[in-house]
Amino acid sequence: MRQRKHRKSLFRRLSIRTKLLVTFALTAVLMFVVNILLYSEINHSMKKLNQVYATNISLNEFTECLDETHENVLEYLNTKSSNSLEDYYRNVQEYRDMMEQLNDSIVDSKSRILEKNIRNMSETYLDLAEETIQAKRGRNVERYKAAFEEESRNYQYIKYAVYNLNNLRFQANSDNYEIMQRSLNFMEILSSVIMVIVALLNILALILVIRTLTEPLRMLARTANEVAGGNFDTACPEYDSEDEIGVVTHAFAKMLESIREYIAKIRESMEKERQMKERELLMETHLKDAQLKYLQAQINPHFLFNSLNAGVQLAMMEDAEKTSIFLERMADFFRYNVRKTEEAATLAEEIETVDNYVYILNVRFAGDIHFEKQVAADVGDVRLPSMILQPIVENAVNHGIRNVEWEGHIWLTVTRQEDAVLISIRDNGQGMTQERILEVLERRVRQADSRTDSSGIGMDNVINRLELFFGRKDLLQISSAGPKQGTQVCIRIPAEEKNDEDGRGELCTEY
């Protein structure tokens, strides 16, 4: 009894993996041993079964060799060719080898006596065949005719005797075959029964072991479901094993006790935390509002004055119609620029502002700004912060194509993907180094000077407003192959207000 308890205690101390490995190893070894024993016995019976008719096969081969020898003798008598003579001696040697396997002793067995007679007649036949061949070679016609006739009669006697012996052996072999067949069928049935019994025993053992492992887990899962439903007063199941299930059960009991101890404190602090969170969200909303309005409020008056001066000069040089168009474009541009009360604009409005800006520049610089755009038809209603595209085009003009020795071009491309709208502004101007790109993206570039001929809205302003508006980073990307290789700025506008990780990735695409 004490030894049995010790074995039970030892099994409880084993890990789950060890228990499963031991169980599967024992069942696998048992199945393997049973299979080896059964298959070895079946293979042994099959070998015996295959050997039953081996004697009949050997007699058939003996008869074929006898026929070939007789045909060789007949062929030599007719043709006297060296090939037939060579075949004759080869078959005679093979025939003699087969004769050695026949019985040559006196025994009390009909088949064995018949074997001895066949062997004796074969010796006589071979002597007559040799005599026939020698008489033919000596051209003694009467002698080889008499010898061949005697050899032919002996040949028929041998075939008849072999036929009788083959029948005797076939009858005996048939009886043995039926016995072996019945024995083999019995072995197949026995092996199937044994395999079924062993399989059932293995399944029963596995069920017992798995039940020992899964029953505590089922009880623990039921307790966990009650805890998940809010019942923290439920009792934790007891499990005295030292395996992984026992460790998990004890840890779960300690965790449940800790939850009971801290649940009161959590309930008290939840209300305070909720109130603080509401105040924090309200402050964050006000802060974003203030930041958006502050960032959108920057504009350089020098740009306005210089543009208006260009309009006055155009009125003096050309007819009033062009001056009217110019001033109308200027009015639209600045009306859109100073619109600070609206938090967002449509992509169509942003593109129209870029068109007005490029028109104004071409008036000022006599059409030196070569601008092309390609916009998808279904992106006009996409919402984004105002004054985003114009500062980027302005950078492409001032820092890209202005003062280059070749003809400068700016391309604006807008395409739609499944989860975003991609905006690309590319120029063939001065290009940028990777260090400079990193400075711009990290917002380490000094804000544009108000005395310069620009709108005053820098790239850091654009990046800040994009991040504040969409609540995420990595929406803008800058790429350049190097100095004098042009620059490309790509913006990824999420298609929906709720963005996930799938919307991130490569922004720039070559067009």
Image: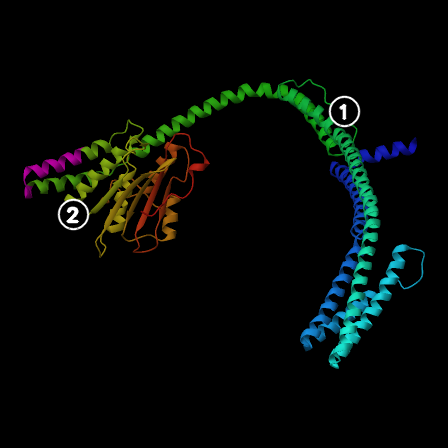
Q: Secondary structure at mark 1?
A: loop
Three-letter amino acid code at disc 2? Phe
Secondary structure that dominates the magenta span: helix
User: In which quadrant will I find the N terminus?
Assistant: top right
Return the residue at label 2.
365
Three-letter amino acid code at disc 1? Glu
On the picture, is 329 further left or further right than 395? left
The colour scheme used to paint the residues is rainbow
Residue at point 72%, 66% (across, down): 68
**Which residues are drawn in magenta?**
316-331
Residue at point 19%, 33% (across, down): 332
**Residue 329 on the magenta span:** yes
For the residue pair 464 and 181, the one nearer the viewer reads as 181
Return the residue at label 1.
238
Image coords of residue 57 (percent x, y): 77, 57
Relative to 73, say whether 312 is above or below. Answer: above
Image coords of residue 175 (percent x, y): 83, 46
